[in-house]
Amino acid sequence: MTQFVSEILSIGGESLEREERFLRELSKRKGEAGGLLRVDLICFPQYVFGRVMKPKFRATLEFTLEGRRVGELAVKIKRNAYFFIMDYWKDEPLAPLQDDVDRLAQQKKVEAYLLVFAANPFGETEGRMSLIDGLSGVEPRTGVYRFGAQTEKGEDYEFWVGAWRVPRGGSAEPG
């Protein structure tokens, strides 16, 4: 994994983890439970992840207006340009993630990555990530950031963000 993508995962992941602690404490004061997973806004995790990139890098953060809502993060560092599609994946089919990969493969003059945000009970993360590893057009997983999160019912989950590079033209072999 490039050092830069590792740094992006670390910075964004730490931002999500801080938000989890803040929201969990806020919920606790109200006599409730939960952190990030109690917020029912489609692009909230991607926003929390991406907003910390703007002051650190030459970055733009946008969200799609049509079709499936995803975050788009573009970062320029030195002479390198990176483009990330940030998708929050629940227990739905893989087709929307494959659509993201196909779109990333069309990017020119940038390093393109799929960032998948997900949460599941502890012990299920590797199995879920292996499904994404098998998508057509992704290179092997380049990194992951994980931390404990809590649902509004007080259930302990593992929240994670995984990164997969997508080469131009989608020429990578599946997983």
Image: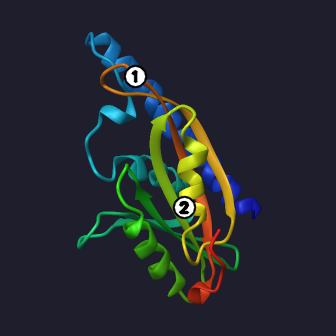
Disc nearer the start of the sequence (2/1): 2
Tell me the residue at 45%/30% (across/down): 20
Q: Which dot marks residue 124?
A: none
Residue with the mark numbered 2: 132
Helix, strand or loop status at disc 1: loop
Q: x, y percentage for residue 54? A: 50, 58
Amino acid on which disc 1 is placed: Glu
Task: Name the colour scheme.
Answer: rainbow
Give the answer, above or below, for where 132 lies relative to 117: below
In the displayed structure image, the side of residue 12 where residue 100 appears, left or right: left
Q: Is residue 123 visible?
A: yes
Tell me the residue at 54%/70% (across/down): 135
- The quadrant of the picture occupied by the C terminus is bottom right
Q: Residues within 10 Å of mark 2 (few under 14, many from 20)?
A: many
**Whole-number angstrom distance, CA of label 2 to CA of label 1:** 25 Å
Q: x, y percentage for residue 27? A: 31, 19
In the displayed structure image, the side of residue 77 where residue 59 appears, left or right: left
Residue with the mark numbered 1: 155
Q: Please give the count of numbered marks on the rendered protein.
A: 2
- The quadrant of the picture occupied by the N terminus is bottom right
Q: Residues within 10 Å of mark 1 (few under 14, many from 20)?
A: few
Helix, strand or loop status at disc 2: helix
Amino acid on which disc 2 is placed: Ile
Q: Nearer the viewer, residue 156 or 14?
A: 156
